[in-house]
Amino acid sequence: MTHIPLVCSQYRKRDPDFPFQLAVHRLDKHFPAHRHDFMEFSLVLEGSGTEVIDGVEHRMECGTFTFVMPYQVHEIFVNPEDGKPLKLFNCNFGMELFWRMHDNFWINRFLLQADQGLPSQIQLEGGHYDRILATLTEMHEEYTRESLW
């Protein structure tokens, strides 16, 4: 039997009607190497582990913010000694959200140059972590709300 890795066969695809998804995930075991057809960022809320992005490993702990482009292969290893699952905000969004905007929009230039030596992650602390956490919490509440408008 031939085994085809997730990176080549089965990766989550975003909803084409609404190219944005925001969720809280709890990982209690290794998440195998994969890639996506969308951009993804995550913010670690609890637990610890490591993530490997295109062969480069970094630690994941509370405050680790990671940004992954569609072509980047990544996998996550949960630290079993921690005794807690790795809990994180996870956001997936289609590139077309940005490409439809004016060509001079600064984030388009940033994203097109993102692989030119910039790290895939940053460790947020103090007020920086608090502001991002508050923003993502508010966005998640709005995203999961079922009320009209």
Image (cartoon, rainbow, N blue to C red):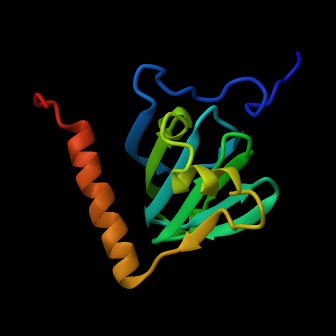
Residue 57 drawn at (x, y percent): 74, 65
- Residue at position x 44%, y 56% in the image: 88
* Residue 128 figure quarter: bottom left
Is there any visible trace of residue 55 in the rendered image? yes
Question: For this rendering, which residue is in front, 109 or 103?
Answer: 103
Q: Considering the image in quadrants, where does the C terminus appear?
A: top left
Left or right relative to 112: residue 147: left
| Residue 44 vertical position relative to residue 75 in the rendered view, above or below | below
Is there any visible trace of residue 85 in the rendered image? no
Which residue of the protein is positioned furthest toward the right in this rendering?
2
Question: For this rendering, which residue is in front, 123 or 46?
Answer: 123
| Residue 111 vertical position relative to residue 11 in the rendered view, above or below | below
Question: For this rendering, which residue is in front, 117 or 13?
Answer: 117
Q: Considering the image in quadrants, where does the N terminus appear?
A: top right
- Residue at position x 61%, y 57% in the image: 110
Which residue of the protein is positioned furthest toward the bottom in this rendering?
126
- Residue at position x 50%, y 55% in the image: 42
Left or right relative to 94: residue 31: right
* Residue 48 figure quarter: bottom right
Residue 144 drawn at (x, y percent): 24, 38
- Residue at position x 51%, y 41% in the image: 98
Which residue of the protein is positioned furthest toward the top in this rendering?
1
